[in-house]
């Protein structure tokens, strides 16, 4: 599933390419992927100019000149691919990033005035593109429950601690994955950041010291930023189905590296289950104990 860094890669890439372009046509082949009234599409989307692209957690918000916005959730297999004088694609890493489009994963096609196109591809059809008045976007249920952005300049480790400590009896991993505590952290970055801070992911929040929480906060920010700097999963680092896939895992220290040596201590990384999720950890660096 594309996580925060991959969605940020989509945002940054598309910002350079589609802001200022005017939409002239939109087609879709699956109503759940594009659950919008035809009348709204005709009135507020077709003919609109793209004004800005923002990201909140793992959701993209494309702001339009009509004061409507496209809210896009990539979910499991969504990706956005731009084809014009330049090519760009990011999100779920598969061959549609680089192949001929539209293909069988294409759900929505946005056509711009100059003939360039933006494809929303989504093999498994869990993602969606909603057209909403921009003023209503912050009020949709999905956003109302969200915690702060982990990379926001004004988000401090003390606020992070305070939000974590609202669930003292939960495991540190469960709380990291709780979108109301902090927004946009999924399985990869939860595993990577607790490894970075040397905390066993099943440690209860109430047993984690302030010093460790501070380390965890730093580790989380570092791993998210590193992935963003590497361009998440985009067509630039996607090779093909047989080659290095997607590469948003290329920097991972523990995630999906079970059986391999811990980069810090050489102990074999194991895979276990914490908070109902497959969890990768180093049994030496991340001993189960009170921290
Ligand atoms: Zn280790």
Image: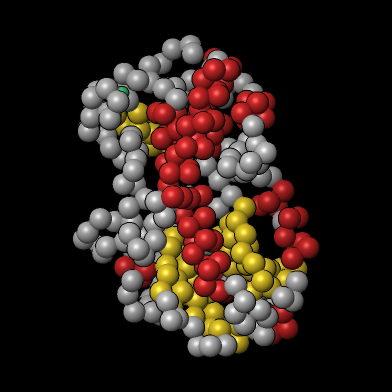
Q: How is the image coloured?
A: secondary structure
**Left-right relation of 247 to 259:** right
Residue 38: x percent and y percent? 67, 82
Q: Residue at x 30, y 25 (%)?
A: 264
Residue 134: x percent and y percent? 74, 65
**Left-right relation of 204 to 238:** right
Q: Residue at x 52, y 55 (%)?
A: 8
- Say if residue 139 shows up in the picture: yes
279 relative to 91, above or below:
above
131 relative to 223, above or below:
below
10 relative to 1, above or below:
below
Q: Residue at x 35, y 63 (%)?
A: 236
Q: How many marks?
A: 0
Name the residue nearer the viewer: 166 or 219: 219
Residue 201: x percent and y percent? 45, 26
Q: Residue at x 39, y 56 (%)?
A: 233
Q: Residue furthest right?
A: 135
In what quadrant does ligand 1 lie?
top left
């Amino acid at each position: 599933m594309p996580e925060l860094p991959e969605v940020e890669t989509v945002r940054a890439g598309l910002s350079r390419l589609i802001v200022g372009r005017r939409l002239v046509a939109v087609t879709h082949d699956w109503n759940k992927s594009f659950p919008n009234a035809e009348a709204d599409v005709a009135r507020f989307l077709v003919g609109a100019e793209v004004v800005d692209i923002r990201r909140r957690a793992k959701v993209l918000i494309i702001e339009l000149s009509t004061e409507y916005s496209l809210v896009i959730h990539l979910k499991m297999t969504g990706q956005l691919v731009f084809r014009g004088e330049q090519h760009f694609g990011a999100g779920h890493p598969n061959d549609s990033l680089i192949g001929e489009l539209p293909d069988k994963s294409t759900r929505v096609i946005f056509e711009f005035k100059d003939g360039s196109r933006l494809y929303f591809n989504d093999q498994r059809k869990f993602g969606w593109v909603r057209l909403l008045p921009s003023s209503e976007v912050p009020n949709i249920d999905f956003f109302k429950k969200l915690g702060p952005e982990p990379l926001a300049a004004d988000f401090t480790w003390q606020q992070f601690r305070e939000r974590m400590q609202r669930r003292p009896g939960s495991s540190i991993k469960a709380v990291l994955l709780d979108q109301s505590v902090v927004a946009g952290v999924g399985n990869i970055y939860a595993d990577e950041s607790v490894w970075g801070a040397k905390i066993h992911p099943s440690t209860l929040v109430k047993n984690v010291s302030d010093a460790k929480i501070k380390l965890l906060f730093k580790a989380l920010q570092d791993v998210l930023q590193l992935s963003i700097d590497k361009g998440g999963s985009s067509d630039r680092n996607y090779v093909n189905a047989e080659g290095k896939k997607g590469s948003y895992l290329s920097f991972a220290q523990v995630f999906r590296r079970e059986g391999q040596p811990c980069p810090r201590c050489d102990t074999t990384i194991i895979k276990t289950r914490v908070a109902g999720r497959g969890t990768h950890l180093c049994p030496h660096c991340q001993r189960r104990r009170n921290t």
